[in-house]
Image (cartoon, grey):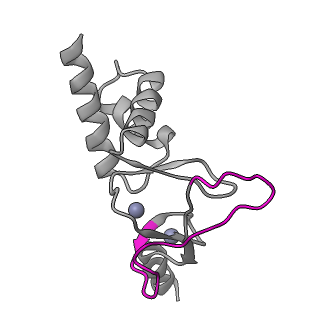
Amino acid sequence: MQERQTKQKQIIYDALKTLNHPTATEVYAFVHNLYPTISRATVFRVLGGFASGGKALELRSAGSEVRYDYNVYPHCHGRCKVCDALVDVEVEGLPKTGIKATACDGFAVDGYEIEFFGTCKRCLEGKELRS
Ligand SMILES: [Zn+2]
Ligand SMILES: [Zn+2]
C-alpha cells in the first residue's frame, strides 16, 4: 500500500512537471490517460498534499480554477489573454523581501500572486501565420 502511494505520488508529480501550470482537472486527465486506475480523488488529494507540504505552489487568481506549479521558488506569472495559458515571468524592481500587505477590517492575508497579462508565444506565432 505504501509503495503504491509513493508510486502514485511520483506519477502525479511527473505530470505536474510535464504540464504547464495545470489545474487539478488537467493533471487528472493526463494521469488518467496513462494510468486509468488512479482516481480523481487521489489526484486532488495528492496535489493538495504537495501544496501543503511545500512541494508545489497553489496559484489562485480571480475567476479561474486553482493551478499548480512544481516550481516553488517565488516567481510571478503572466497570463495569455488569448488562450488563458500561464507562463513564468521575470520581474525587475520587486523588493527581494517581497511585498508587505497590512490587512484592513480583520482580513487575514495568507499570500499574494502577481499576475501579468499578455500574449503567449504560441498565440503570437499563430497570429503571425494568419497575417
Ligand atoms: Zn496563448
Ligand atoms: Zn510558475
In this rendering, the answer to whether 92 lies above or below 109 is below
Between 109 and 124, which is closer to the camera in this rendering?
109
Can residue 90 be found in the magenta stretch? yes
Can residue 21 be found in the magenta stretch? no
Q: Going by the image, does 2 lie left or right of 129?
A: left
Q: Which residue appears at 42% of the width and 42% of the height? A: 51
Q: Which residue appears at 48% of the width and 69% of the height? A: 77
In this rendering, the answer to whether 34 lies above or below 113 is above
In this rendering, the answer to whether 76 lies above or below 15 is below
Viewport quadrant of the N terminus = top left
- Picture coordinates of residue 89, whole percent (x, y): 42, 75
**Total marks in image:** 0
Magenta residues? Answer: 87-110
Q: Main secondary structure of the magenta part?
A: loop
- Picture coordinates of residue 86, whole percent (x, y): 48, 64
Q: Which residue appears at 53% of the width and 73% of the height? A: 99
**Residue positioned most to the left:** 3
- Picture coordinates of residue 115, whole percent (x, y): 56, 70
- Picture coordinates of residue 34, whole percent (x, y): 29, 31
Q: Which residue appears at 23% of the width and 34% of the height? A: 10
Q: Going by the image, does 127 lie left or right of 51?
A: right
**Residue positioned most to the right:** 105
